[in-house]
Amino acid sequence: MDDIPLAALFGALFILILLSAFFSGSETGLMTLNRYRLRHLARIDHAGAVRAQRLLEKPDRLIGLILLGNNFVNILASSLTTIIALRLGGETAIAAGAGLLTLVILVFAEVTPKTLAALHPERVAFPAAFVYGPLLWICYPLVWAINTVTNGLLRLFGISTRDATSHALSQEELRTVVMEAGAMIPKRHQDMLLNVLDLENVTVEDIMVPRNEIVGIDLSDDWDSIMEQLMASSYTRLPVYRDSIDQVEGFIHLRKVLPPMLRGELDRDTLMSLIEEPLFVPENTPLSRQLLNFQREHRRVGLVVNEYGDIQGLATLEDILEEVVGEFTTDPSASGRHFRPQEDGSYLVDGSTSVRELNRALNMELPTDGPRTLNGLVLEYLEDIPQPGTSLLLAGYPVDIVQTKGNRVKTLRLHPHRRRPPRDSGA
């Protein structure tokens, strides 16, 4: 070593520090790669992504190779530093050389390259993958021996390297990904994606038209009343029943009724021949499942029944789609009829309005794990039928009872922008 010029030793030390920086930075870059973006790039045959994905399929081998190389160059750099220190200042300079090398490696071969790789993993990992492929093939026997020993030690602690960690995202994790997508996904599209994820947690009972609001054709009425209802209806499909909805016959599509009506051939017998079989939907069916059921049955509307078979309401394909894309219909049951804005910023709201509809339209946070309607929420909270003029805090929102009718609250005044912290965890 005494014959080697100091310049050559310093040059070799510089190269070793660069190699140490390469191993440290590439390790961080490869391990922090976005696995889903990596799969996408590999699927479109990005060369660096294909090689990086192949390396990450066996992470124990990759880590063994990186640590083998990193420790080798660091130990070699330490040895060279000792030789240089001895030649420059004797044994007293060894401690100073060790301290200086530690600082240099820490700053230039650890912190800086790892920070760069953490900020831009693809820029570091993909070029490194071209190096690690051949290097792993060359050093495979040594890497295999090291991995065999380390895997044996892990098995002593009951850990198996075959238990690969799943990279599948849970529903809540996927929600976080969508919400943090920022400008990559427009806000409107983010809302739609989140609504799609929520379909599994929402049932047809949450979005159905309540039984008392179902509009249909009563075959017990006189023919003139039936004809008038058919001509004035704002709905495309109507349930047909006798006396009450419990004795439903089926559904009638007005598009099928129109031709015989225009020809003057429509009578009770013709009307009965056009009735379609009713589709019954259990009230606890998730919207995601019901959407598929509508698709499979080629239907757009169904009657919601409880566990005893009693009809509770009516659910349509449009109602489910509105859970994803928001309100898009102009029928009378749309939200504009259910709440009307006032000059003071409050809203006059119909008691039958869905809690979910209010939350979505007015950006409120009323509880959805209890009653489905605003009337039900008020009655559950007060445990009584309130008198007009009664005021209360509902989940922190000021609510005034404007009108009651029989055993229900008909009209309320909501102040969504004057929320106060709720005093308890309930309504």
Image (cartoon, rainbow, N blue to C red):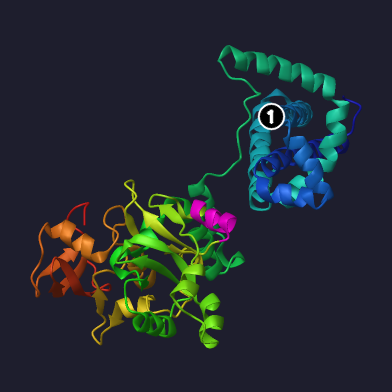
Q: In the shown orientation, is residue 260 left or right of residue 217?
A: right
At horizontal 54% and vertical 77% (from top left) the residue drawn is 255
Q: Quadrant location of the C terminus?
A: bottom left
**Residue 156, position as x, y percentages in the image:** 58, 12
Identified by mark 1, the residue type is Ala
What kind of secondary structure does the magenta stretch mostly adopt? helix
Q: As rendered, which of 257 and 161 lies closer to the eye? A: 257
Relative side of 327 to 306, left or right = right
Quadrant of the snapshot with the N terminus: top right
Instruction: Return the x and y of residue 192 as percentages of the image width and height.
Output: 52, 64
Question: Element type at marker 1?
Answer: helix
Question: Residue 32: x, y in percent?
Answer: 64, 44
Residue interval drawn in magenta: 289-298
Question: Horizontal placement of 76 versus 182: left or right?
Answer: right
Magenta stretch encompasses residue 294: yes
- Residue 268 appears in view: yes
Q: Which residue is mark 1?
A: 93
- Judging depth in this view, the residue of 235 and 277 nearest the camera is 277
Report which quarter residue 144 is drawn in.
top right
